[in-house]
Image: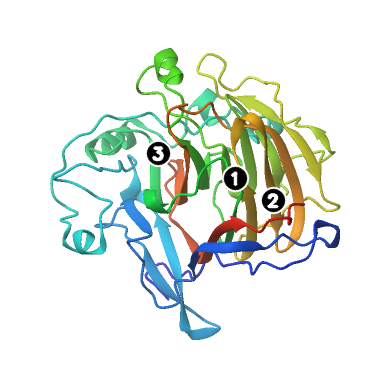
């Protein structure tokens, strides 16, 4: 069952042909990726493990207790991931190579430094509802001087967070302006020790690359864009956010064990917080419009598998749209200006990553992924 005693995560939600009126998600026209990890291997032509600690905390495969011939991908997060993990793409420390290169890579070798972009986790949506300061405002109670010393000693990102993420290889990344379907079946730990400090925890994220150079000119070379779509697990609560440039909006959530419930009423996005460097954590207004299904409250993946389907299109030149389903049930459609302005001289791609990216906590967890499927949306099947 793997050294953490936990199995399986993201499994593939088989797409059906039913329409939104029947409560089911649209189907794919074609699949560019159909990954069920059944044979217990990771295709390094598809996936880049550059932000996984392959030496001290590697991904592994777990037997499906219901099918001894099936395997699940398990991604742990523990103290070995403290300090983050840079993705090095230049020789001699190239970490995102072909299977042959990856197999020969000396993971424990001394690595050259590369320019660091500060990728901020941003504020939590639960802190205010619990009457506590967010990590962004009040600091992480677990981030002591000793912990920071360890984070810097790792010689990675040097920050008080943990990162264990797989990313798609760049040549597999879909174009950002076209509608692609992402089906993910996964499971999170049954218990999370801290559900009251709103520790920020991203478990899947989508980004546009490259964004406009104007942001670097305004905020400096170390500024990095937030994901335009993120699946999060702060306080052990599954929730989803969508970014309208510097305004991040909560668009779906499972119930918080001790927090107030959200008002899921169709119309302009209401739960929005700024990620602008000068207004971080303040309320903001967004162009985003939300249309909810009949029962838009997410089910928790704590100790059980859920199927999440995202139909994803980002862009600011025209109205873009993201549609979200869980277990075949329509949750919400998000439309408006999604993401950031992109480089007008480039064709932006969608960078997709899955795993753990969170503020440091001294607790070890495993995300189990059963399957991931990515493909272009079938014409005429929009909600």
| Viewer can see residue 7 | yes
State the residue position of label 1: 235
Residue that mark 3 sits on: 161
Instruction: Bin the neighbour count of mark 3 within 10 Å (Cα to Cα): few under 14, some 14-19, many 20 and up.
Output: many
Q: Is residue 188 visible?
A: no
In this rendering, the label closer to the viewer, 2 or 1? 2
In the displayed structure, does residue 138 sit left or right of residue 115?
Answer: right
Please tell me the numbered disc located at residue 187: none
Residue 90 sits above or below residue 192 on the image: above
Q: Nearer the viewer, residue 318 or 269?
A: 318
- Which residue carries the number 2 mark? 324
Position of residue 318 in the picture relative to residue 52 (left or right): right
How many badges with numbers are in the image? 3
Residue at 64 percent of width and 57 percent of height: 309
Q: Secondary structure at mark 2?
A: strand
Give the CA separation, mark 3 to mark 1.
15 Å
- Which comes before the other along the chain, label 3 or label 2? 3
């Amino acid at each position: 069952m793997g050294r953490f005693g936990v199995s399986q995560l993201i499994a593939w939600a088989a797409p059906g042909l039913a329409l939104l009126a029947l409560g089911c998600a649209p189907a794919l026209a074609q699949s560019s990726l159909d990954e069920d990890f059944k044979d217990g291997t990771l295709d390094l032509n598809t996936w880049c493990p550059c932000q996984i600690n392959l030496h001290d905390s590697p991904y592994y495969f777990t037997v499906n207790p219901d099918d001894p011939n099936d395997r699940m991908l398990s991604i742990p997060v523990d103290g070995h991931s403290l300090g983050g993990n840079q993705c090095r793409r230049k020789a001699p420390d190239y970490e995102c190579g072909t299977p042959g290169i990856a197999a020969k890579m000396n993971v424990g070798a001394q690595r050259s430094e590369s320019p660091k972009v500060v990728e901020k986790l941003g504020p939590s949506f639960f802190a205010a509802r619990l009457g506590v300061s967010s990590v962004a405002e009040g600091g992480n109670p677990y981030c002591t001087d000793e912990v920071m010393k360890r984070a810097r000693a790792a010689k990675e990102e040097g920050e008080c967070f943990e990162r264990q993420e797989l990313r798609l290889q760049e040549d597999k990344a879909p174009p950002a302006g076209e509608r692609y379907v992402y089906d993910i079946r996964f499971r999170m730990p049954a218990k999370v020790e801290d559900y009251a400090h709103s520790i920020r925890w991203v478990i899947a994220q989508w980004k546009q690359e490259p964004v406009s150079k104007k942001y670097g000119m305004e905020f400096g070379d170390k500024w990095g864009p937030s994901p335009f779509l993120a699946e999060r697990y702060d306080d052990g609560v599954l929730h989803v956010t969508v970014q309208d440039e510097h305004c991040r909006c909560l668009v779906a959530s499972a119930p918080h064990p001790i927090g107030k419930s959200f008002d899921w009423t169709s119309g302009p996005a209401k739960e929005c917080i700024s990620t602008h460097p000068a207004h971080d954590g303040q309320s903001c207004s967004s162009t985003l419009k939300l249309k909810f299904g009949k029962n838009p409250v997410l089910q928790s993946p704590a100790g059980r598998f859920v199927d999440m389907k995202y139909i994803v299109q980002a862009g600011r030149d025209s109205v873009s749209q993201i549609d979200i389903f869980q277990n075949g049930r329509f949750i919400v459609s998000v439309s408006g200006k999604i993401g950031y302005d992109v480089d007008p001289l480039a064709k932006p791609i969608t960078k997709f990553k899955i795993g753990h990216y969170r503020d440091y906590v001294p607790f070890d967890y495993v995300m189990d992924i059963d399957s991931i499927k990515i493909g272009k949306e079938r014409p005429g099947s929009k909600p």
